[in-house]
Structure formats: C-alpha cells, structure tokens
Amino acid sequence: MTNVSIITCFTYLENKKYLFNPTYVKADLRRIVSYAKNYIGCAFKHMYVITDIPPNINLRNEIRKEFYEEVNNNLNKLGLKHNITFYKTQSPLAWLEQVCTNLTYNNDYSATYLFTSIVSKIIPVINNHNVIEFVSLFTNFIQIRGGVHYEQSINSIFSTLPHSTNLFFYYTGHGVRFIDVYNNIQIVHDVRLVIPSYHGSIDFYSRHTLQRSFAMLNSETSCIVIIDCCHGENLLELPLTFKADGKLKHSSEQRLSNKYDSSIIYLSSTIQGQTCGFYIDDKDSGSLFTHYLIKTLKTTSLNTERINKIHSDIEQKIHKYRIRTGKTPQNIVISYSHDKNKYLPQWLFENKENTVKIVEKID
C-alpha cells in the first residue's frame, strides 16, 4: 500500500470578509505535515500541499542554498565528489536522489542508504515561520487560484493514485451554508467550501462536487477525510455517523451505502449549523479541532480504540476549552462508509517504514 497525503490550508489573504490569521493556518499546516510524515510515514513525493499562501522567495532560496551546501559537506566527509549542478527549478530531494544514484562510491554504500543517511541529518526543522517555504520545496506544492483549479487539482491527484492507497485528506478553510426561505422557514439546501481565487475574490465548491471526486476512488483505497470548517457535517454523506449524543446513526437514504467504493472515515469539526474556533495559548495556536485531533492521534494506542472513544475524547477537550473561553458549543462528527470501520486504520498511527522523520518546532 502507498501512503498519500493531500493537505489543503487556506487563509484568504486578500479578502477582508473571509481572512484567517495566517499564523493559525500555518500552525495547522505544520501539525498536519509533520504528522503525515512522522506517524503515517508518507513520503514527501506522495504529499500534496494545496494552499493560497505564496512562499517567500528569499526564505525559500535560503533553505535551498543551505540544503545544497549541507549535502556537499556530507559528501565531502565521506570522500565522495559529484559534478551534478543544482538548479533553482529542481526539487532538492529529486536532485539529491540523482546525485546518490550517479555517484561512484564504495560498495559499502547503496544509493538508498546514502540518500537516507544524508537527508536524516540535513532536513530543515519545520515551524510556523518556514512551513510554506518548506512544503514548496519538499512536497508537491499547488498554489490554488479558484474553484475550477481546486477541482481539477483534486481530480488529477485522485486519478493518478496507485490502485492500493492509504489516503490522508485534510482541509482547513471556510465552509458556508446556502439558505432558502419558504413560508418564513429557513432551509439549508447546500453547504460549500470557500476556495480563494484571484486578487482576493472567492469561489464556492459544492459538497456535491466534493462527493463526486471521492466517488472516483476504488475499493482498494482506505481513506481518512478530515475537514475542519464551519457547517462541515454534510460535506460527505456516509451511511453511518457518530454525533454529539454518542449514538450511531444510520442514514435513512440507503443509496448512500453504495455511493463510495472505497473505505472512508470522515471526521468533521462541526455539526450542521455550528461554527468552529481557534486554540490560542502562550506557546501555540491554530484550529481548536486540529489541535486536539492531532494531539489525540499521537497518543492513541495502535488500533485498539474504537471510533466512538476517539470521538468522545476529542469532543470533551473541545467542549472544556469552549466553555473556558466563553464560546458557543462545537461538536464533532465521525462518519464512515462501512460497518467494518469500527476502528481507525492501523496505517494512521504507525510509521513502519524506515523513512526520514522531520523535526517539528512550535514557535
């Protein structure tokens, strides 16, 4: 199985109505990227970061230059020299793989061993300050411009996934309700994601479009979908749902059970009609849901806690924080596509591969 991560983080930088604090969003991105790499074992080449935040060119060039210099220093210590030019348009890791593959060295080293040993020493520390520049260099980086671009990007990634894939999908940004009024009664007829477009404008990405994309996934795909936004409950409609009362709800629409071939577990930060909030203290910040979700996942015993236990643990922590800060309730929802999904999958917790782990720093 191939582990793949698709991570969306939007700030709406030029839009006064929808603007998020970039520091909070960068903190969420830092958490998710480090979790996907260190705990799931997702290789950088299988990690996609989708955002509207442009990297700082000077900082990115500094990271790239330092990476190049550190590679040469490590190779010189081993008595290995190369003549492969480093190009600014080239991925640093792809360049290093090329160097390791083409070097002539003692039989004691393999290209894989050399690559891993060097990267483990020189991958930059990831923090809020450099996270955008980090992912723009070391992952598949997509800077989004509009709803059509977002849909095309998601569908393009989905269509090229290996047949057997563990997919970790994360979205943080805005979710909005579209409401009609009939006889003075408000009826929610759609929930949509808000996608940043050109020059501060925005597009709306419907839940039906999102569901159509996930319907592309085959039965060999195991998928965790995390959407951290307001009004998130119905963005993916799955037949089995845990809600605030702790009870399992079966969808009345039987057609939903056949809507997706893949095994999907969907975690939403809000039930319908609720808005979500941020976690802020002296040391850290970011989305309240993402903060407690990642904290809980990092301390969860492998494949031993049922979904309803995970649900209650996270929701209780959110509930206490919201009361302490005088906020309205925020309840999470966990839905899944098949009866067999009573536990979160093993691949979500345990990095079995001998992969390089990145160092995460809270700043």
Image: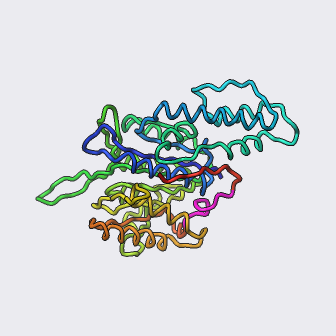
Residue 146 image point, x, y percent: 36, 36
Q: Position of residue 131 (x, y in %)?
A: 50, 44
Q: Residue 105 falls in which quadrant of the image?
A: top right
Looking at the rendering, the stretch of residues picked out in magenta corresponds to 344-352
User: Which secondary structure is most common in the magenta stretch?
Assistant: loop
Q: Residue at 48% across / 41% down in the picture?
A: 132
In this orientation, which residue lies closer to the viewer: 135 or 349? 135
Q: Position of residue 159 (x, y in %)?
A: 54, 41
So how many labels did they put on this image? 0
Closer to the camera in the image, 77 or 323 = 77
Which quadrant of the figure has residue 335?
A: bottom left
Left/right placement of residue 275 relative to residue 113 reads left
Q: Nearer the viewer, residue 117 or 94?
A: 117
Single out the residue that lies furthest toward the left: 183
| Residue at image location 25% in from the left, 51% down from the top | 178
Residue at the location (62% across, 46% down)? Answer: 43
Depth check: 359 or 343 in front? Answer: 359
